[in-house]
Structures are given as C-alpha cells and as structure tokens.
Image: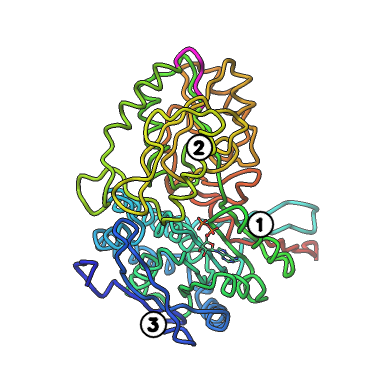
Amino acid sequence: MTIQLNDSTLLKTQAYIDGQWVDGDKGETFAVTNPATGEHLADVASVGADETRRAIIAAEKAMVSWKALPAKTRSELLERWYSLIIDNQEDLAVLMTAEQGKPLFESRGEVAYGASFIKWFAEEGKRVYGDIIPSTADRRGVVVKQPVGVVAAITPWNFPNAMIARKVAPALAVGCAMVLKPAAETPLSALALVELANRAGLPAGLFSVLPGINAQAIGGEMTSNTIVKKVTFTGSTPVGKLLMKQCADTVKRTSMELGGNAPVIIFDDADLDAAVAGVLVAKYRNSGQTCICANRILVQEGIYDAFIEKFAAAVKGFRVGNGMDADSTHGPVITEKAATEIHAKVQSAVAEGATVVIGGQAGSQGACFYEPTILTNVTDKMRVFREEIFGPVAPVFKFSTEEQAIAMANDTQFGLAAYLYTENMGRVWRVSEGIDYGMVGVNETAISSEVIPFGGMKESGQGREGSKYGLDDYLETKYICIGGLNR
Ligand code: ADP
C-alpha cells in the first residue's frame, strides 16, 4: 500500500450511496495520484447520472425521519462524528497530503478546522429560532424555519476535508439530507469522512458521496432533479455561473463560494513585520491555492522598498518539497497543468515589463512544483492583477494615496477576502467600509474559523458558511398566519 495509515480501512475507493459502498454501474474508475511524486495512489469508482439519481431518491427518503428528530438527537450524531474525526486526525491528514500535496502540518490543521464546523453546527443546530409577529388584535404572524430539503454539494480539491465539512454539518444539523460530489483530484478525503460518519451512526441515505470523473453528468442530475431543493458549490467562478444557470430551470436555491482576487493593502504606517508575516501566510499557504489567498499585494510608496526586502528574505527561507517530509514548509501545486498555467501568468507579466525578484520558474522537485515567486514593476493591466493566480506567485504593486488603494482594491469583478495593514483607526474604518469584499482582515490574514461568516460579494458568490449565519443557507422561512383570535 502506498499510503500508510494507522487504520487502513479509512482508505475507501468505492462510492457511498444509500448507506452502501458500491462500484459505479458501468464499473468505471479513475486514478488518484500524488502531486508531489506522481505516484498512483488508488483507482476510485466513477459514478454518473443514474447513481446520482438513486442517491438523491435515497436522500429524500432518509430526510423524512431525520428532520422529524429533535435537534438534540441530530446534534448527538454530529458530536460523535466530530470525535471520530479528531481521533483519526493523523490518518485523515496523511490521506490529504498524499492526494492534495499540502504539507502534513497544514493537513492536520485542515482536519481540525473541518471538524470544528461539525462541532459548531452540532451546537448551533439546536438554536433554530423563529418569530412571533404581532399584527392585528385577531391574528399573529408566526415565522418558523424549516430545512430547505435535499441538498446537493459540489466541492473542490484545495480543501478536500473542510469544504465538505462546512456544507454537510449545517445541512444535517437542521434536518436536511445531502448528496456530495467531491473533486476528482481528492476523493479519498471525502470517502474517509463519510466512513467516519457511517461509524458515528449516520442513517442510510442521509449523506451519499459520489466520486466521478464526469462532473457534467453528476452536476447535470443534481441541478435538474426536482427533488433537490438547493445546490451548494465551492469552486471556480465559471463553473459556479454554469451551475446557477442550470439551477434556474427548477428555481433551486444556491450557495456559491467562488473565485477571489484578494488585495492586501499595506499602508506606510503599518507594522512592517506584522504585514510581512501576514502576507507570507495569506499568499503562500497551500502553495497559494486558496480562494482567500493574497492575489494582489498593494504597498504604499513610502515603505515599498523596505517591504520587498523583508518579504523576499522571508520567502528565500521556504523549504519546498514533498508535504510528507517533516521539514517541507510548502508543497507542490495540484497538477502539472496548474503549474503550467501559473507559469504562463508569470511569463505574460514579465513580457509586459514585470521584474522577477525571486522564483519565476517551475520547481526542480517534480512536475507539479512551482518556485515561490515575487514580482515587482507590475501594473493593473497584467493578468496577475486581473485574474486569480492560484499559485505561489506574489505580484507587489505600488500606490500613493488611500483613495487610490481603495480604487485598486475594488477594480475587479471579485469580492471575497481583502486585508489591510495600518495603525490608523480612522483609516481602518474608512477602508474596511470602502472596499467591496465579504471579508476584511485588519492587521490579520488568518481570518477564517467556524464562528465567522465566510463568503463573498460580486462574482465571488453568495451565501455564507460558518457562524450563526451559516444555518440560513439550509433553512426556509415559513410564515404562518394564525387568525380568528377574537373567536
Ligand atoms: P478548479 O479549477 O479549482 O478545479 P472547478 O470549479 O473546475 O475548480 O471545480 C470545482 C468542483 O466543480 C470540482 O468538484 C469539479 O469536479 C466540479 N465541476 C467542474 N465542472 C463541473 C460541471 N460542469 N458540473 C458540475 N461540477 C463541475
């Protein structure tokens, strides 16, 4: 076996449908490979529209008794699932690093982060309150919150555990059932997660996991099937737009966590060391493959040179390598194609006048590696300003005034996360309120946790995950008019 686990039964390669581990109807499989080594890890069952339909029908059936349970009983299952995830944290982390590439310490962190959503929503699901609205003497308006129905979820490869956990936890907590298609690059983390849910006592049909190489077939069934009442998606903006269009025919609700183009605005009055430390994490975590990664670093002219010097010195200290090696600080990117696309953006910037301060080429460690890179002399006309880079490349732009920084930050169709570094309290408020982003980190880039509402504005999506607001995405608001009170 190529992946060494304490509990080898967590390595699952079949689909999980209606409480059973099954092959795809046609017996098709797809290969999962380790991006750090190119090693073949597993062949996983590939399902299509028919299996997806069966999972959706099973979900509808399972939901009948699930939603009727007291919230406390649903919560207890989620708590057991949480404990099993924590107990198996190391195995889940090893699986993740093997299929996704991130360093083991990041994988361990993600498993804990994902589990925190399960615990949070186990607790929060008990607090789904309604309202009583006084209207006239003979009537009252009662507002109740009810589970939205069967939910279909589609998730990406960059956080193979947490992007699932923060969708399935609120859905199950409020009484919904879910069918999930994980990314084809990283199905093993998803399958191990549902195996642990199964061990926690998950009722058959309530949460099916549908790995598959034919995303259109699975997504097509999810978005057209009238049983499905809601689609929740994390991934690229083009695919999100496509899914929204597909959902329009049956007027499904959607939650979309899409691309970002995060600015980090560093003002002359910033704590320079804190800003450098913040950008290092915001830019290079997961080798730059997070939707809230710093994409554009905007530095005020007075500290620009000092910032570049300290930033480059810190990046030189990175140890890029196989995420399984304890001394690797940064791993590969997900595929060779991704590395090629990242290089194309760098080359296009250089052709238009950008300067490579450090990096700028494919890494020597393997086909999926790209050197941590810093670019200067970059402009707002370049692809590295306009597009999400999704790789370890930091373009550093220069600005003069606060107004200019706000305009540059907003000059994008995206609006997920933004960050600013300043010691001026007035500026903190002016800029935070002046930029069009769903999340703003002030003197901090590690902004995400289960207790905060994660989500974007503009073409970065709609809906929020985590926090008390994260429940709303899985609830319908029903108004009941109680009349005749004078009789
Ligand atoms: P990325 O470029 O990061 O892989 P994608 O948006 O392509 O982002 O993928 C995110 C998820 O969406 C993955 O699970 C992928 O398989 C799925 N996906 C991609 N295209 C489609 C589609 N046409 N219909 C349904 N799901 C899709």
Q: Residue furthest front?
A: 351
What whole-number distance in Å separates the C-alpha atoms at marks 3 and 1?
A: 32 Å
The amino acid at mark 3 is Trp
Q: Mark 2 or mark 1: name the one nearer the start of the chain.
A: 1
Circle 2 residue: 295
For residue 200, side relative to residue 150 (left or right): left
Q: Nearer the viewer, residue 410 or 1?
A: 1
- Mark whose residue sits in front, 2 or 3: 2
Q: Tell me which residue sits at (63%, 19%) in the image.
A: 403
Label 2 to label 3, Cα distance in Å?
A: 41 Å
Measured as percent of width and height from the top left, residue 24 is found at 46, 83
Mark 3 burial class by Cα count in 10 Å: few <14, some 14-19, many 20+: some
Query: Which residue is found at the position 45% from the left and 67% from the top?
Result: 184
How far apart are the two marked residues, 2 and 1, measured between alpha carbons? 21 Å
Q: Residues within 10 Å of mark 2 (few under 14, many from 20)?
A: many
Q: Which numbered dot is residue 241? A: 1
Quarter holding ligand 1: bottom right
Q: Position of residue 227 (x, y in %)?
A: 64, 76
Q: Earlier in the sequence, mark 3 or mark 1?
A: 3
Q: Judge depth for marks 3 and 1 and give the one in front.
A: 1
Q: Position of residue 343 (x, y in %)?
A: 46, 44
Give the SS element for disc 2: strand
- Could you tell me which secondary element the residue under label 3 belongs to? strand
Q: Is residue 64 visible?
A: no
Q: Quadrant of the C terminus?
A: bottom right
Q: Nearer the viewer, mark 2 or mark 1?
A: 2
Circles 2 and 3: CB atoms closer than 8 Å: no
